[in-house]
Amino acid sequence: MRNNLHTGLVSGTLTAAVTSALLALLPGLVSPPLQIAVATRGVGLSVGQGAVADT
């Protein structure tokens, strides 16, 4: 149980960080801050849950 929690938190957080960096920094993907926050949260949660379900 503890390993699943760590796996989900780490993978979700890292994926969310990469998503927000891509949306904020790439010139062709300039997005408003609210859109970046919503996309980051959705991607982070879905990847985190998927990583826990996969292990």
Image (tube, rainbow, N blue to C red):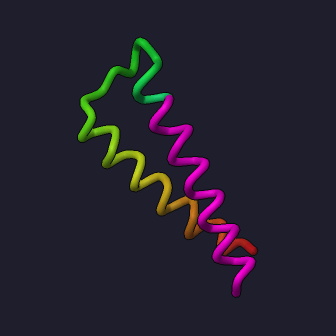
Nearest the eye: 55 or 18: 18
Task: Say left or right for 34 vs 44.
Answer: left
Residue occupying the point 24% across, 40% down: 34
Instruction: In the rendered view, tell whether residue 28 sits above or below residue 12.
Output: above
43 above or below 21? below
The total of numbered circles placed on residues is 0
Question: Is 27 situated left or right of 3 in this image?
Answer: left
Residue drawn at (56%, 54%) of the image: 13
> For residue 6: magenta?
yes
Farthest residue in the bottom direction?
1
Corner quadrant of residue 49? bottom right
Residue segment shown in magenta: 1-21
Left or right position of 23 against 11? left
Q: Is residue 28 above or below residue 1?
A: above
Where's the C terminus, which quadrant? bottom right
Q: Is residue 23 above or below residue 42?
A: above
Image coords of residue 40 (percent x, y): 42, 47
Q: Could you say where residue 37 lies in the image, as x and y percent from the top left?
A: 33, 45
Is residue 44 rendered magenta in the image?
no
The residue at the point 70 percent across, 87 percent down is 1
Residue 48 rendering spot, x and y as whole percentages = 57, 64
Q: What is the chief secondary structure element of the magenta stretch?
A: helix
